[in-house]
Amino acid sequence: DGGITQSPKYLFRKEGQNVTLSCEQNLNHDAMYWYRQDPGQGLRLIYYSQIVNDFQKGDIAEGYSVSREKKESFPLTVTSAQKNPTAFYLCASSISDRGKTQYFGPGTRLLVL
Amino acid sequence: EDKVVQSPLSLVVHEGDTVTLNCSYEVTNFRSLLWYKQEKKAPTFLFMLTSSGIEKKSGRLSSILDKKELFSILNITATQTGDSAVYLCAVDAPGAGSYQLTFGKGTKLSVIP
């Protein structure tokens, strides 16, 4: 089955803790993205990567970090510097050619204890 | 700054009604407009529109783009309870070297029996 998987489904973070959200795709897509969705808000781009070992900041990168060591994987770390991390996090991927559709994973809901 | 505005923000209709969702945009370097349906988790792709005046259709859903007036509409005829979801509009308008989508806040559609 081709697709994008995210884990965990729910994640709880304690104050001062870094947590990592997983995103894996087997679609052979070059580009991968991380979005944050808050209630009543659209999706806001955190980071994106067009190719392995390269990534760019999106609109709200502060307090987050990413890596892209493999084509299939694009983990997102929510650091302690992110003061309001409670949100729904969506990972997406697309073929890198211009104008191609982004396909989304099922999301991870992050809650702060 | 690129902007995508959806209206209405929420809508309640009865089964069998026809609905029209709106998406207007102000972006530079417009390439395409995409519609997604988000039920509980991952947004699922509905349509990608690149040319004005050409209707895209899938079952009871259809969409059209007006590049002169900078808007798109998504029509759903004979609505069913399974159409209840948040409908997201996104515009692909990359700056130099980027592949970002700008999302609207979504329209929450509730279809009641």
Image (cartoon, rainbow, N blue to C red):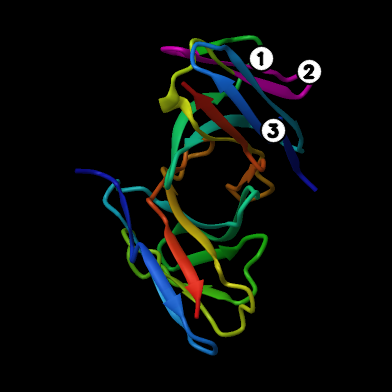
Residue pictured at 42% horizontal, 47% vertical: B41
Residue topped by disc 1? B52
Kind of residue indicated by mark 3: Phe
Q: Indicate the secondary structure of the residue bearing disc 3.
A: loop
Q: Residues within 10 Å of mark 2 (few under 14, many from 20)?
A: few
Residue topped by disc 3? B30
Q: Which residues are magenta?
A: B57-74
Q: How many marks?
A: 3
Disc 1 to disc 2: CB gap under 8 Å: yes
- Tag 2, which chain? B
Q: Indicate the secondary structure of the residue bearing disc 1.
A: loop
Specify the label residue B18 is tagged with: none
Q: Indicate the secondary structure of the residue bearing disc 2.
A: loop
Residue topped by disc 2? B68
Quick one: label 1 or label 2, which is nearer the N terminus? 1
Q: Quadrant of residue A87?
A: bottom right
Residue pictured at 48% horizontal, 10% vertical: B78
| Same chain shared by disc 3 and disc 2 | yes
- Tag 1, which chain? B
Which of A96 and A46 lies nearest the eye of the viewer?
A46
